[in-house]
Image (tube, rainbow, N blue to C red):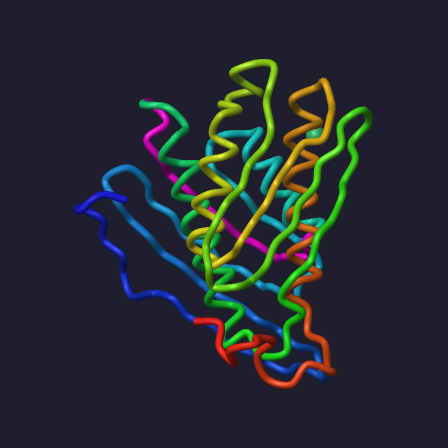
Amino acid sequence: MGATEQLRPHTAHAKIHQGGILMRTAAITRTTRETDITLTLTLDGSGKTSLSTGIGFFDHMLDALCRFGQLDLALTCRGDLHVDAHHTVEDVGICLGRAIRDALGDRAGIRRAASAYMPMDEALAFAALDISGRPYLVFDAEFAAPMCGQFDTQLAEEFFRAFAVNAGLTLHLKVLYGKNDHHKLEALYKALGLALRDAASIDNRIEGVLSTKGSLD
Ligand SMILES: [Mn+2]
């Protein structure tokens, strides 16, 4: 994030009970000299996406995250892909993380912590997360090739770090084993989606914020 960043005050979140259904939403617009991003997110969605980052494989990963996380996401990013994919991937992580944090609001009643294993053919990935307000990423995965389509495999960690920091997550991700990079990456994004869906869900037995100190900030 450079000093030239313009963060327009265009964030919003709402809890709307439509026929008793919780709808937690957020909208983000962020423009820098490197990327121009607009997104709308529904946390309590059904996994419907409309994605355009200019990087086909990255769109595929975001779609996997949203489908398994039951997130509705409309996202467009016009990034400086003539440089490389780095700014686009990292900045989408920043904006999506902020949207998650905004949509969660005061985080009252959420389960807060969850984990998930996700296989894809020969690969197995694991995600554990805590919506703690204490941002931290542990990332343990190695890839055989530098690229997967137009996506640099080393950018996966950059995305997940930006996402965790901006969403306020303690996030641990690991590929336990696997051979195919596409499978390993897709399993990671799906595992994150599964764990996030669980951790963000409302448990009616939880009164207020689930915290020993009474606050998540
Ligand atoms: Mn795939």
x, y percent for residue 111: 67, 69
- Residue span colored magenta: 69-82
Give the quadrant of the C terminus.
Answer: bottom left
Is residue 98 placed above or below 13 in the rendered structure?
Answer: above
The answer to which of 207 and 11 lies nearer the viewer is 207
The answer to which of 172 and 49 lies nearer the viewer is 172
Is residue 32 placed above or below 155 in the rendered structure?
Answer: below
Q: How many marks?
A: 0
Q: Which quadrant of the picture is home to ligand 1?
A: top right
Examine the image and state in which quarter residue 126 appears.
Answer: top right
The answer to which of 136 and 71 lies nearer the viewer is 136
Examine the image and state in which quarter residue 29 appears.
Answer: bottom left
x, y percent for residue 85: 41, 28
Residue drawn 59% across and 59% down? 130
Side of 37 where 15 appears, left or right: right
Task: Say if the magenta span includes residue 11.
Answer: no
Side of 83 where 182 appears, left or right: right
Task: Say if the magenta span includes residue 79.
Answer: yes
Side of 116 where 12 appears, left or right: left
Residue drawn 61% across and 50% down? 49
